Amino acid sequence: MPESQSGKSPFMVAGAAARAGDLIQDTKTFPLKEDAIGKGEEPFRQGDLQFANKMKALVVDDDVLIRSNVAEVLRNDGWEVCEAESAEEAFEMLHRDCWSLVFCDVRLSDKNNEEGYAVLRSFTEEQPEAQIVLMTGHGSAVGALDAVSSGAYDYLMKPFDVKDVQRIAQAVRRGIEKRARSAVTDASLSPPVYTSDIDLIGVSAAFVELMKLVGRVAGTNLPVLITGESGTGKEIVARAIHRRSLRGAKPFVAVNCGAIPSELIESELFGHVRGSFTGATVDRKGLWQEADGGTVFLDEITETSLAFQVKLLRALQEGEIRRVGSNQTLRVDVRVIAATNRDPEQEMREGRFRQDLLYRLNAVTVHLPPLRERREDILPLARYFGECMAAAGASPIGFSIDAVRMLENYDWPGNIRELENAVVRAAALCDQVVRPEDLPDRVRNCSKVAMNELVASEREVSGADEELLSLAEVESRHIFLVLARTGGNKQAAARVLGIDRTTLQRKLERYNLEQAEPDDMAAKRQHG
Ligand SMILES: Nc1ncnc2c1ncn2[C@@H]1O[C@H](COP(=O)(O)OP(=O)(O)OP(=O)(O)O)[C@@H](O)[C@H]1O
Ligand SMILES: [Mg+2]
């Protein structure tokens, strides 16, 4: 029996003789198509078909009603849709065309409970650009975890809503459009990247690796402790974990523990009853209860008092809380994600943080590296913040090579938040292209030493000095100059110099420039 018939089907039709093309009768869980379609946040514009060749979707389900209904929703969103009723047919389709979006049932026949996962694996391996959504009538946390960790874009439990299909289809479509647009305007600079409904930008190996861990723990109920300097993205990562967890549709309540006076934090979090302290004039529900079923994000957790830490530990261990002034316990189901920009182990060693609470919270620790340790992320982040400004009505901006070099050289002690502020400010000051003068002084000054070096060596290379140089000397200095300008990127330097990388490599070896830092060059100039 197809799995959708075994449980509550969202696609039930009146009478037994359901044929493909019948209207959906169960309008509560899956409203009539005419009503539902086109009400998404971003209806497909019929005239806007330039990316249509990328918009191919496949729907795989042995239940004809589910299949045809999902297909219909997608067609109304502008997709070209094919249908398959078995894993075999899906594999055939996989080799026949390129797909951007695949909705696939997990249990495709009575014999096998998990063919959908095999389809998922084949598609992610052979067509990594395809976004796969698994649909299941037998949803489970491990099912979702396995799906997401095997690369599924999403995991839908039946019955689901038309809106779920629309939300996914639109997000995937936006990703395709965004990629196509950036391919047109910025072909050499922005290779196509995967986009998601979560705006978490980063391409550095360190960050990508970390997000794999985040993806793996998201679907679990484990507490997560996020550490990292201020502005490294602890909150945005906490939100991503929540969004990708089974609690994603439930509340995410962020509490800045450092900003709440210690005498108030217990009542803020757990609530209080009337008369329990001066000023408690009415009963009040705490934030913990507001988050029931969802996630509480305890930011700056190491700023809490030891007395409060005991109460927090109890709430975590027992899964229940007590309002201030009440004897009654309340069961509340929350997942906790905590964050700190201090070193929690050190706080513990120095007696400011309870060991038992730390071990309760850090089932999984995610340490976000500072931006200066993942400089490859600087430019994509800067571009992203520029795009956000443009989306909010500002004119689109680009970055001059010098500005990029400065952004990439600066150490960003305030991390991504500081970069965001710098880009927002620059976007307001500049005329379409962000140049060094649009950047904050501290960013510019940081490159000053290197800049002085460059100016000096430029002067020498241009022959403004008295000293006469040999051709080899001029060449070696010029190569060094270009390398400094490209931030040490040999590929880019070779391009500027008009030679291939191997030739550049040979010259670097010949002139002993392989390890040269700007200081070495200064020394070279003085002594030689
Ligand atoms: N990877 C990222 N992609 C896009 N935006 C990011 C990313 N990381 C951080 N941001 C943005 O940078 C800003 C700072 O991030 P966030 O508030 O999450 O940092 P934080 O580590 O919680 O900082 P603090 O310790 O000061 O509370 C936010 O505006 C956030 O949206
Ligand atoms: Mg924060």
Image: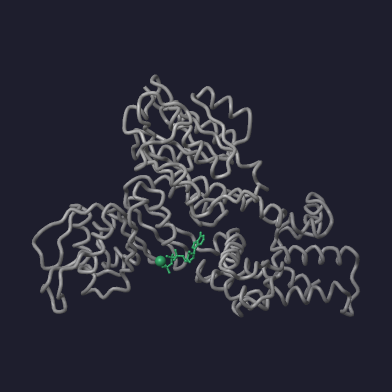
Q: Horizontal placement of 288 versus 94: left or right?
A: left
| Of 524 and 228, the residue lying toward us | 228
Determine whether, in the image, residue 458 is placed left or right of residue 39: right
Q: Residue at x 47, y 28 (%)?
A: 20
* Quarter that holds the C terminus: bottom right
Q: Is residue 374 left or right of residue 273?
A: right
Position of residue 499 in the picture relative to residue 220 (left or right): right
Residue 113 sits in quarter = top left
Q: Nearer the viewer, residue 159 or 269?
A: 159
Q: Quadrant of ligand 2?
A: bottom left
Looking at the image, is 292 positioned above or below residue 427?
above
Toward the left, the furthest residue is 327
Residue 148 visible from this viewpoint: yes
Residue 494 x, y percent position in the rendering = 79, 56
Image color mode? one colour
Outermost residue, top side: 111
Above or below residue 159? Residue 39 is below
Could you say which is closer to the camera, residue 82 or residue 381?
82
Is residue 449 in view from this perspective? no
Residue 474 at what x, y percent from top left? 86, 67
Residue 473, percent across and down?
86, 66
Q: Is 293 rendered above or below residue 343?
A: above
- Count of all numbered marks drawn on residues in the image: 0
Q: Residue at x 43, y 43 (%)?
A: 162
Q: Measured from the top left, where is residue 131 in percent x and y?
A: 53, 41
Quadrant in which the N terminus is drawn: top left
Residue ID at (26%, 55%): 292
